[in-house]
């Protein structure tokens, strides 16, 4: 394949394009979540609730690293889409090489630094003593996969910017099947427990990365050739202006989630098992919302680069309408089936009830989160990433403050209520910013007398 761009989103039906772009991303995200689902489901049923909680207790800490990577690559994807829209297809190769080198190198350093400190870091999070050893073993092995995650995400970001959302789906499809097979072998067959689950994920991530690197070579614009000119400082500066604010937000959010993990650990092992299992389900349930937001961002960035602001605004309107329908449908799913889904992980009946209550409260706010995601996608597609990042951080601060302030009123369900209220705060801020952009546009259109 020698064509330069996989999907031109600057013309044609916007709703159809948003759906066509989102569906492969939803499927790839669904399969990617199977990594943690397979680990949790197989370990929970093979080793019991204690091992399940041990994996869940590492989630926030490991997400600190992965969210930094995915946050940075989101900025890279916006740059790729803008340059694609403006017809600068040759820049894609320099984006791919420059940021694979930078992000991959940083993740190697993170791995070498954090592996020896895994046990101490988990103790700081007040990980329950009965699961600390298993959590430390699981996290240490998972950290080895960070460089693979970095290279994968840069390639995926550039391909998304070019309009190709099929590549992540295919790469994750191959690796998820391997992950499940290895989980069955190492956990059920060889009884390696959480170590076996982590090793299965590590090998699968490596394969996923190899697949997407080879896939990218199908595009002439992404074929890397030995050349000093491939590392482009100007591209790096432009990419960092978009990526750093998103990365800072992702990093602060992840640190905040560590504080929330520490807060949640105070409710005991049973609540940890219930809520971390609920969040695994929640991360899959919300994929249509998150990836529709990515589609809106990509469409807006391509149309902004192509000089079509009116079409970009129509993309937001179509996206908000689609978000409302999707969000309400997902609310119905978690309210009706949330408890049964959590029970699949092998938790106790009481833990399943805790998880079902969590979904009943949080699911009521899904439509708010959907509208937040749509408007955020629009703003980031315009390049307004600093405001988006600042509001994300402020929303997290609201969530943490409410978690502690309302604990006496809501008990362990404060985790759901505080998150829902934080989404409401975020929506108000995004609507205000949207109104600000529209006012600036009207002011520019008023002729000076």
Image (spheres, helix red, strand yellow):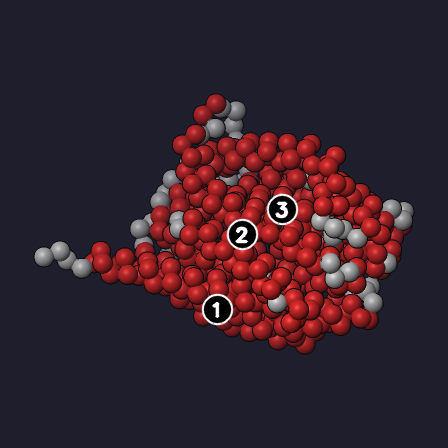
SS class, disc 1: helix
Point out which mark residue 64 bears. 3
Q: Position of residue 5 (x, y in %)?
A: 45, 46
**Left or right: 234 in relation to 323:** left
- Which residue occupies the foreground of this view, 274 or 303? 274
Mark 3, residues whose alpha carbon is within 10 Å: few (<14), some, or many (≥20)? Answer: some
Q: Which residue is mark 1?
A: 322
Q: Residue at x 49, y 24 (%)?
A: 227
Splitting the image into 4 quarters, where does residue 428 fall? bottom left
Mark 1, residues whose alpha carbon is within 10 Å: few (<14), some, or many (≥20)? Answer: some
Q: Position of residue 385 (x, y in %)?
A: 43, 49
SS class, disc 2: loop
Q: Residue at x 42, y 52 (%)?
A: 387
Q: Position of residue 64 (x, y in %)?
A: 62, 46
Splitting the image into 4 quarters, where does residue 83 fall? top left
Earlier in the chain: of badge 3 and badge 1, it is: 3
Residue 367 versus residue 82 in the image, above or below: below
Q: Nearer the viewer, mark 3 or mark 2?
A: 3
Earlier in the chain: of badge 3 and badge 2, it is: 3
Splitting the image into 4 quarters, where does residue 217 fall? top right
Residue furthest to the left in view is: 449
Point out which mark residue 165 bears. 2
Q: Residue at x 55, y 74 (%)?
A: 328
SS class, disc 3: helix
Residue 266 versus residue 350 in the image, above or below: above
């Amino acid at each position: 394949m020698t064509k330069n761009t996989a999907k031109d989103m600057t013309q044609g039906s916007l709703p159809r394009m948003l759906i066509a772009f989102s569906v492969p991303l939803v499927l790839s995200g669904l399969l990617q979540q199977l990594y943690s689902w397979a680990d949790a489901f197989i370990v929970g049923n093979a080793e019991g609730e204690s091992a399940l909680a041990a994996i869940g207790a590492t989630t926030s800490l490991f997400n600190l690293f992965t969210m930094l990577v995915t946050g940075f690559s989101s900025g890279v994807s916006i740059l790729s889409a803008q340059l694609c829209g403006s017809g600068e297809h040759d820049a894609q190769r320099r984006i791919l090489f420059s940021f694979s080198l930078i992000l991959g190198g940083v993740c190697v350093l993170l791995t070498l630094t954090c592996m020896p400190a895994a046990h101490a870091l988990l103790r700081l999070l007040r990980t329950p003593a009965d699961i600390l050893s298993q959590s430390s073993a699981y996290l240490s092995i998972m950290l080895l996969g960070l460089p693979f995650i970095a290279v994968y995400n840069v390639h995926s970001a550039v391909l998304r910017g070019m309009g190709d959302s099929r590549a992540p789906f295919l790469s994750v499809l191959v690796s998820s099947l391997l992950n499940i097979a290895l989980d069955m072998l190492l956990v059920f067959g060889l009884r390696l427990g959480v170590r076996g689950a982590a090793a299965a994920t590590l090998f699968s991530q490596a394969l996923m990365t190899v697949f997407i690197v080879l896939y990218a070579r199908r595009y002439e614009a992404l074929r890397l050739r030995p050349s000093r000119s491939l590392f482009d400082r100007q591209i790096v500066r432009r990419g960092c202006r978009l990526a750093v604010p998103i990365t800072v937000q992702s990093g602060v959010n992840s640190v905040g989630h560590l504080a929330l993990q520490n807060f949640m650990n105070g409710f005991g092992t049973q609540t940890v098992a219930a809520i971390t299992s609920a969040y695994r389900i929640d991360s899959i349930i919300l994929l249509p919302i998150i990836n529709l937001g990515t589609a809106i961002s990509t469409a807006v960035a391509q149309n902004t680069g192509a000089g079509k602001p009116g079409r970009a605004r129509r993309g937001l309107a179509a996206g908000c309408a689609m978000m409302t329908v999707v969000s309400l449908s997902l609310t119905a799913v978690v309210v009706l089936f949330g408890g049964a889904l959590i029970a699949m992980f092998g938790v106790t009946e009481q833990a399943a009830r805790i998880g079902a209550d969590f979904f009943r409260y949080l699911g009521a706010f899904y439509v708010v989160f959907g509208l937040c995601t749509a408007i955020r996608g629009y703003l980031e597609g315009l390049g307004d990433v600093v405001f988006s990042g600042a509001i994300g951080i402020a929303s997290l601060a609201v969530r943490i403050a409410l978690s502690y302030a309302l604990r006496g009123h809501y008990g362990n369900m404060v985790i759901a209520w505080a998150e829902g209220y934080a989404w409401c705060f975020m929506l108000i801020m995004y609507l205000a910013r949207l109104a600000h952009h529209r006012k600036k546009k009207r002011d520019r259109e008023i002729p000076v007398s």
